[in-house]
Image: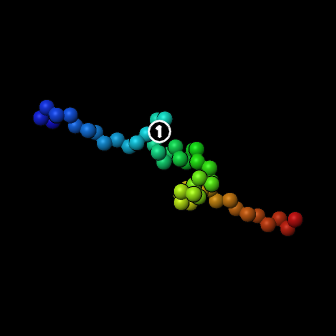
């Protein structure tokens, strides 16, 4: 614009993935807990077999 470069805003990427997708694929439960990302943790259902 008017002879100046314009910065195009893009989402930050890690290895071609968005940051959120990278965290979902690579983070372990301990890291998620330490960084208070509990909403990304998979819930483990406990079953009571009676054993």
> Residue at the location (58% across, 48% down)?
27
Give residue 50's position: percent from left, percent from top. Answer: 85, 68
* Quarter residue 34 falls in: bottom right
Of residues 13 and 34, the one nearer the viewer is: 34
Query: How does the figure colour the protein chain or chains?
Result: rainbow
Residue 4 lies left or right of residue 45; in this view the side is left
Q: Does 13 sit above or below residue 51?
A: above
Q: Residue furthest right?
A: 51
Could you tell me which residue is drawn at 62 percent across and 50 percent down? 28
Q: For residue 39, what is the image quadrant? A: bottom right
Residue 16 sits above or below residue 37 on the image: above
Which residue in the protein does label 1 denote?
Answer: 14
Q: Which quarter of the rendered picture does the C terminus lie within?
A: bottom right
Tell me residue 9's x, y (percent): 31, 42
| Horizontal arrangement in the rendering, residue 32 relative to residue 8 (left or right) | right
Q: How dense is the environment of label 1, judged by Cα within 10 Å: few (below 14), some, or many (20 and up)? A: few
Furthest residue to the top?
3
Q: Is 8 placed left or right of 3 in the picture?
A: right
Residue 16 shows in this picture: yes
Image spot of residue 36 (x, y percent): 53, 60
Q: Is residue 46 above or below residue 30?
A: below
Q: Assign the N terminus to one quadrant of the image.
A: top left
Tell me residue 6's x, y (percent). Answer: 22, 37
Instruction: Assign a secondary structure to mark 1.
Output: strand
Q: Residue at x 47, y 45 (%)?
A: 19
Q: Give 48 or 23, whichever is nearer the viewer.
A: 23
Is residue 39 in view from this perspective? no
**Residue at point 63% right, 54% down?**
30
Judged from this view, the residue extending furthest toward the front is 34
């Amino acid at each position: 614009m008017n002879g100046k470069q314009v910065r195009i805003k893009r989402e930050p990427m890690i290895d071609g993935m968005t940051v959120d997708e990278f965290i979902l694929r690579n983070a372990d439960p301990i890291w998620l807990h330490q960084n208070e990302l509990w909403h990304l943790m998979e819930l483990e259902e406990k079953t009571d077999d009676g054993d």
